[in-house]
Amino acid sequence: MQVRKTMMIIETIETDGFGKACDPITRVAALAVIQNPFAGRYVEDLSSLFDRGGQLGERLIGDAVDMLSRPPVSYGKAAIVGVSGDLEHGGAMIHPKLGKPMRSAVGGGKALIPSNAKIAGAGVPIDLPLGHKDEAWSFDHFDTMTVMVADAPRPEEIVLCMAVSDGARPHPRVGSGPIKD
């Protein structure tokens, strides 16, 4: 696997959107820019991308968790595929082998890991969805971390993104659990 670069983005939220102070919430995103071996061509067997996603998860997610101020409670994953690739290339990176190292690093993971993938050019942001690691219906933890790499993905690259957070949104007021109509 050819990795061009990796990045760690640390975001600390200290107030809500109205300036009301909150306990600091730390979010960390780990990103890797890799060469897409299938750019420009249709390939039926994408299993080597499954493996690459798992390997990058093992390599990066532990460092992201270590950068949190408190234990992780939320996680998410995403991929940006360069314009010579296919959306399935991003899906293959984030499913099915990336989840195992992420769950191991956060010490749980009963809930599905929220995910997103898209085709885009260099410097385009992606909304990396976050959700509680164990409680899929914790609305307070439904969140997004927007990330980007200024010079990636190039047409024949994929940007793999993983994020962890040690808190919910600041001052959540939506509640948890399904709402009955």
Image (cartoon, rainbow, N blue to C red):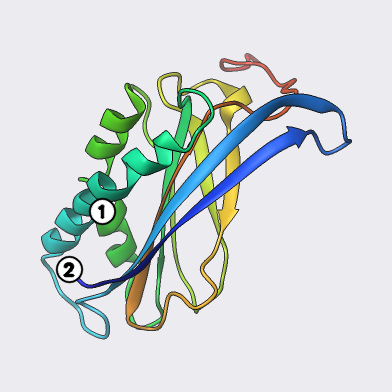
Vertical arrangement, residue 143 with respect to residue 2, above or below:
above
Measured Cα–Cα span from mark 1 to mark 2: 10 Å
Task: Answer left or right for 29 relative to 45.
Answer: right
Labelled disc at residue 1: 2
Vertical arrangement, residue 168 with respect to residue 113, above or below:
above
The answer to which quarter of the image holds residue 82 is bottom left
Q: Residues within 10 Å of mark 2 (few under 14, many from 20)?
A: few
Residue type at tag 2: Met
At 66% from the left edge and 16% from the top edge, which residue is drawn?
A: 175
- Are the two marked residues, 1 and 2, in contact with CB atoms closer than 8 angstroms? yes
Quadrant where the N terminus sits is bottom left
- Disc 1: which residue: 56
Q: Position of residue 24 (x, y in %)?
A: 68, 29
Q: Secondary structure at mark 1?
A: helix
Nearer-the-camera pick, 104 or 143: 104
Quadrant where the C terminus sits is top right
Task: Answer left or right for 164 relative to 106.
Answer: right
Q: Position of residue 29 (x, y in %)?
A: 48, 48
Q: Secondary structure at mark 2?
A: loop
